[in-house]
Image (spheres, rainbow, N blue to C red):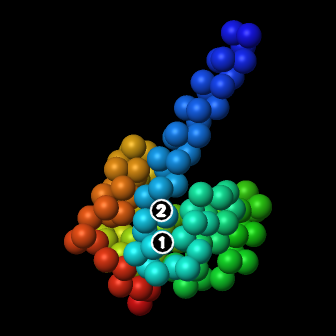
Amino acid sequence: MEEMLVALLLFLITFLFYFAGSYPFFLLFKKADYENAWFAFIPILNIIALLHVIEKSGWNTLWYFVPVVGLVFTIIWFVYFLRAYNQNPWFVLLWLFTGPFAYIHIFYMAISENVQYVGVD
C-alpha cells in the first residue's frame, strides 16, 4: 500500500512539473494564433507546434533522431523562436548554462503583455 502511495505521489509531482513546463508554451502558441495550441501538452506534437510557429516544417522533428544534430537544431530553432517574439536571441546561451532561467524567461514571455508574436523575419 505504501509503495502505491509513493508511486501516486511521484506521478502527481511529475505531472505538475510537466504541466508547469508546457503551459507557458501553450500560452505562447496562442499568442502566435496557432490553432492547435493544445499541442504544447503532448510530447513530439509540442515540437511540431514550435516548428510551425517559427514557420518551419514539422518534418524537421526527424532531426532529433540524429545524435548531436538534434541538439544543434534545437538551439537554432530557439533562436528563431525568441526572434519571433521580439526577444534577444542571445538568451539561448543563457538558457544553455542556467536551465531554471529558461523556464522563468519563457513563463515571462507567456504572461507578459509586452511580449507579442511578431513572426519570423
| 1 and 2 marks in contact (CB < 8 Å) | yes
Residue plotted at (40% across, 50% down): 103
Locate residue 62 relative to residue 32 in the image: left or right.
right
* Cα gap from disc 1 to disc 2, whole angstroms: 6 Å
Locate residue 60 relative to residue 72 in the image: left or right.
right
| Residue linked to disc 1 | 29
Query: What percent of the width, then of the height, locates residue 57?
Result: 66, 82
Residue 52, placed above or below residue 93: below
Circle 1 packing at 10 Å, graded few (<14), some (14-19), many (20+), is many
Residue plotted at (41% across, 90% down): 121
Query: What percent of the width, then of the height, locates residue 106?
Result: 38, 58
Q: Secondary structure at mark 2?
A: helix
Seen as rendered, the residue at the extreme top is 2
| Residue linked to disc 2 | 25
| Residue type of the residue flagged with mark 1 | Phe
Query: What percent of the width, then of the height, locates residue 78?
Result: 48, 67
Residue 111 picture quarter: bottom left
Locate the N terminus and report the quarter of the image it occupies: top right
**Callout count:** 2
Circle 2 packing at 10 Å, graded few (<14), some (14-19), many (20+), is many
Q: Is residue 29 in view from this perspective? A: yes
